[in-house]
Image (spheres, rainbow, N blue to C red):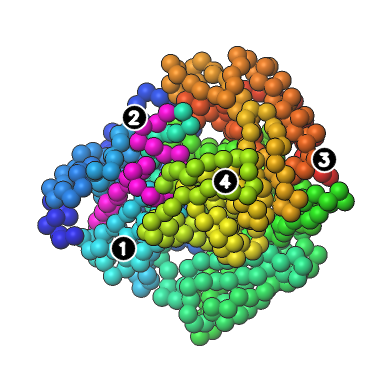
Amino acid sequence: MKKSALFILVLCLTCATATRAQSWQPAGDHISTPWAQLVNPAAPLPEYPRPLMQRDDWMNLNGLWDYTVVPVGSISIRKQGQILVPFCIESSLSGVGRTVGKDSVLWYQRTFTVPKAWKGRRVLLHFGAVDWKAEVWVNDIKAGSHTGGYTPFSLDITDALKAGENTLSVQVWDGTDTGFQPRGKQVSKPGGIWYTSVTGIWQTVWLEPVPEQHIANLRTTPDLDGGRIRVLAEGATKGIVEARLSADGTGVASARALAGSELEIPVPDAHLWSPDDPFLYDLEVSLMVDGKVVDRVRSYCAMRQVGVMTDEDGIKRMTLNGKPIFMYGPLDQGWWPDGLYTAPTDEALAYDVQKTKDWGFNMIRKHVKVEPARWYYHCDRLGILVWQDMPSGEWTSPWQMTQLYDGMEKSRSAASEANWRKEWQEVMDGLYSHPCIVVWVPFNEGWGQFKTVEIATWTKQHDPTRLVNSASGGNHFLGAGDILDLHHYPQPEMYLYDAKRVTVLGEYGGIGLAVEGHLWAPDRNWGYIKFTSPADVTEEYVKYARQLQEMIARGFSAAVYTQTTDVEIEVNGLMTYDRAFDKVDIPRIRAINQSVINTLK
């Protein structure tokens, strides 16, 4: 874009940060979580955003930015207000609370000054996630672009920088449900199980100085059979990489390899990771060039292994560290009444994970959404197994749940298919080193499902260390992936069984309770079935759990209950959308959940 077209977007940035922060207020009149009151507009979500690869020097760019929404192709752009990054423009916590739509683009702008201590290093600009197409300028110089609403991307902006104040501008377009891009539960007109659109920046934006030769990414792979951790430091083209493993501050082992080569660290008498004992090793990786350490990052890893076995009754069971395990947890959609896709604080982000543990579950199915890296870090450290869905898009394929042989699929354009594959690979690559993730779920209920057998095979080839749940809830194909996944509401039911794959109940439940004072829309709410008291919800939940437990001997090896929280007008959560009210008797729920899980111990 020419400079004259770009900065007729001359946005006035002369006010002091404190003054700008005082002008921010949440938008709208929907309910909010308790953490919304703790959001600091001068420094929202200040935590280091990438726990798997930490450096000491960095600069958080979250905070109040200037914004404008203009028609696609518009040349004249003038500041319309301020938006609190990283909350999407539709959210309350953005301070804006408006939609954008396919016919408009959203512009962001702010200034920053690079610390003098960073001189002589390359400066990377990181985005946790921007939904969907982002184009980035620094000082009117195009720095790069990215498509994909759920994955991080980085740009080297060093050559566009100048001394003193620099201007960062971002243009975002998102067609939500009008295009082929993956978008999960977002729609232009929310209702039922479909929710408000999310446009723009919704994860942390930050700067980081790095040397010319540096580590761009870490891939850690536990190898229990070989008694080792494999580590690949990506990015550097010369030098030697050294990795040091420690446990509780005590050195365990180290290894070296030429840059670009995978190294192997022996782990004698490995302390295994599991939900009952989520032990994490500390990992420090250094890059040495000409005998000098030029880059160093801190990370962590775990020794754990996922697989499939056949039990004494001939039933395929999932295994963790070589032992059969019944994986049981809630469908977790990851939505917030105040931040939509973005939790108000890191404490809030961790809260849902800890709550899942408190309820006695050992697993979460992350449903058609990808979370910030810190969410997976919380799962890693707290001990929760994760089934990771691919966000759905380009709806919909014809859907059937009851046949194994004649699954139906959607015909996608070449561009749509290429985009889907690109984004799914970015999801897998971005989350690869998190030990909590044990299952990849490329498709749900025929939502844009295509080339199922091929995609399941490709997913397994891309990451052979995890199980593949090819088609959760329908459009089943024999031989596609490791898992046959059934959905049935409200009560559990086993209406199909696969002797050659693991059979699971990927969704059931949906017991609804509308709690006055905690509703997104008090005049309308929805659930698969509805009750009027927590006591009744608890009784129904326990009844279903006992039915499920009886089906484990017949072949079920995992189950997913719908769901963690209410979401917008859905009221079938175990707690309300604002996380302020538990709808069940927690000791009773915990006891039955643990009993179900222990069936296979």
Indicate the amino acid at tag 2. Ala
Quadrant in which residue 161 is drawn? bottom left
Q: Is residue 84 above or below residue 116?
A: above
Give residue 553's mark. Answer: 3
Q: Position of residue 197 (x, y in %)?
A: 38, 38
Mark number displayed over residue 424? none
Q: Which residue lies furthest to the front in this view?
A: 406
Residue at (50, 49) in percent of width and height? 409
The disc at residue 27 is: 2
Tell me the kind of residue under disc 1: Gly
**Proximity of marks 1 and 3: CB atoms separated by less than 8 Å:** no
Q: Distance between the residues labelled 3 and 2?
A: 51 Å
Q: What element carries label 2?
A: loop
Q: Where is residue 407 in the image (x, y as percent from the top left)?
A: 57, 48
- The residue singled out by tag 1 in the image is 144
Seen at 33% across and 39% down, the residue is 89
Hey, what amino acid is under mark 4? Asn
Start and end of the magenta stretch? 165-191
